[in-house]
Amino acid sequence: MKSFTVQYIQKFKLFCLIMLLIIAQLLKAQKVPPCGHDHFESLIKNDTTVQNRRQALERFTQTFKSTRVSNTSDSVAYIIPVVFHIMHEYGDENVNESDILKAVERLNQDFQKLTAEEASVSQSFKSRIGDGKIAFKLAKLDPEGNCTTGFTKHATKLTNGGDDALKLIVQWPPERYLNIWVEKSMTIKASAYAYFPGAPEILDGIVILKNTFILDKIVLAHEVGHYLNLAHVWGFNNNTFMPENCALSDFVDDTPTTTGSNNNCNLNQNICVPGIKENVENIMDYSTCKKMFTIGQVNRMHAALNASISGRNNLWSDENLARTGTNDGFTVDMCPPVADFSHKNIRICEGETITILNVSYRNYTKSSWFALSEKGDLLETQDGTFTFHQAGQYDVGLIVSNDAGLADTLIRKGIVEVTPKNSINQPSKQDFETFTKLEDQWSVESEVGTTWEINQDAAFSGIKSLILIGDSLNNGTSDIFYTNSHNFGQLNSPEFSFKLAYAGSPTSKDQLKIFLSKDCGKTWQLKYSKTGQSLMTKSSEMDEFVPTELSQWRTDFMNVASLKNESFVLFKFEFISDGKNNIFIDDISFGLSSTSGTSESIAQNITLYPNPTNGASTLQINTPISSDIQYAIKDIHGKIVSKDIVLDSLESTYIVLSNPLHAGIYFIDIVINGSRHIKKWVVIE
């Protein structure tokens, strides 16, 4: 058993990676089937270990049905401990406890013949309605024996189609608990899916969409049916209303042969055997009027619960009920509350007020908040409403407690960023030469893996630039950096440009987006977006890309005409990874003043003399310069011979260029006011 689990972990990790690569908006395009049965069938197709387990269970089931004595008691025969894992991003997919309680209540009604709908089952099948005598109870003790309310909550982007990968985040021992994961969307074309007994332990359980969980709770009963070894009423596939289904079997004697229904409720359906009505009201059908299990289906589920396959017989054992706190009469002291609020960064202007939503859970009656600045300033409140009068980054903490004196504290570091009202006057340029760490100057957000950082291996000018290293293990993740605030109020024609180097491929989904905000980061406008071939500055490379020549860089522009008269502007750069290659950013130019001259006018006022020369030459710039001048002397192969920075000047600038060691053709690469100019320099002996 152990060797099988270890073997399957490797397969499962690969499976999860593939699943994460194909996240798509399947649910928007078409009617979503209620069940992902084919997901399991495709998984076990070539897995002989799972197939052997399933065959052993089928042999046990047939023996169990032929030898069991009918239970005429009205009492519950089986108790199954349940735990729900709520996977969320602090949206409405973060379902509350009342919805969980309603789901468990509905399961108990469906599996104990207690639903209101049961009375309306058509006369042809009233005598076949089965009472499962199965009770579902939320666990009161977790795997370590600690108090629990039968659900866990986990903030993760994998709520968007994580599917089986959710089980790497949390799974309680499947031989002791029925695990149910609730997520926001799925990659497979379904609204829920379950694994039959015999599946690998690390996959065992049920995954269900939040909307289905809330709005159509009969689907959960359908999946529990699969979990307890029930096929669809037509057989072991996911294809409804197909004539060939008439030749299949669900291995249950009292469910008539059927094609299955297709989101309808035709009580007179008799496609397979004319004159014999099909059980469209069965919970294991795809009809819109699912109401019942049959007696034969109940016998099959009981067989699964008495078999050792996947430990189903351990779930309801006295020992396990005691370990999970689901045995009759078990009492537990009040569980401690869990403090929780969103982990997403909050950006506001100095002097503004915000309210942070408290989403704590588990019986808390009191709460208190605090915010602590980098300078040690402390703010306190009872309702999560803060007014931040001082700029800077703030840690935010929440303490919740209950009447039993149990408490929990959550602190999120640097979650609030308050932007000062003073801005950098434009034009200006950031070349990162004075940066040691990016996060010391600007804000950085990274989900996982690599992030934006200062790089000294390549630069368009100077020796430093920004790099985000391609991370193939974390495809689809987002990495962001935010600039400080900029004042465009004095510019007649504001402009924005930056230097970019990237070598992906035409089919790459690596994407660079740039946004601007006029309200301290509360709202953002998308102004630039490139991906694939439009993002590339060099053809695809297999190895990690590092630009070695200036020709591998490109100047990209962003339309910021709307920033005229705006005195408070932030910029956000976001790279969404497809894992293809590194990306470099340098020389971000914020604005271009009408008094500083255009790129064309500057070019007309740059002279180099004498040229050719057998000695020194002078580079003369006959125009006022509003920012420092950076220049580099490069040989014909692009190798830097020397470089320097000259301070800005209100008058003409003269730069003396000393003679290189060898005669030849050189290029003077000059960056002035955010624009690049090249002068050819010929040195003779």
Image (cartoon, grey):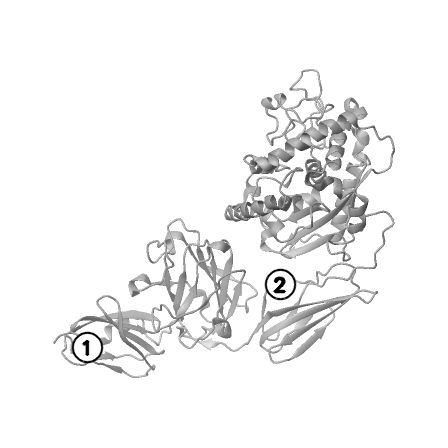
Q: Regarding mark 2 in the picture, which secondary structure is present there?
A: loop
Residue under label 2? 343
Q: Is residue 571 left or right of residue 52?
A: left
Residue 44 lies, with reference to residue 169, above or below; the image says above
- Residue 507 coordinates in the image, percent (x, y): 40, 48
Q: Residues within 10 Å of mark 2 (few under 14, many from 20)?
A: few
- Identified by mark 2, the residue type is His
Residue topped by disc 1: 661
Q: Looking at the picture, how far across and down is residue 291, in whole percent?
A: 75, 32
Relative side of 473 to 339, left or right = left
Q: Is residue 570 above or below residue 39?
A: below
Residue at the extreme left: 685
Q: Nearer the viewer, residue 412 or 498?
A: 412
What amino acid type is highlighted by mark number 1? Leu
Q: Is residue 216 above or below residue 143?
A: above
Q: Locate the N terminus by quadrant.
A: top right
Per the rendering, the mark at residue 589 is none
Q: Seen in the image, is 428 located left or right of residue 386?
A: left
Kindly identify the residue that appears in the image at 34 percent across and 58 percent down. 537
Q: Is residue 93 visible?
A: no
Q: Which percent across, then down, holds residue 583? A: 41, 61
Q: Quadrant of residue 27?
A: top right
Task: Using the image as rendered, state which of residue 207 and residue 434 is in the foreground.
Answer: 207
Q: Badge 1 local density, few (<14 within 10 Å), some, or many (20+)?
A: few
Residue 132 in view (yes/no): yes
Of circles 1 and 2, the one toward us is 1
Relative horizontal placement of residue 136, taking residue 672 as reference (left or right)? right
Please determine whether, in this image, residue 655 is positioned above or below residue 72.
below
Cα separation between marks 1 and 2: 58 Å
Extreme residue in the top direction: 275
> Residue visible at 32% across and 70% down?
675
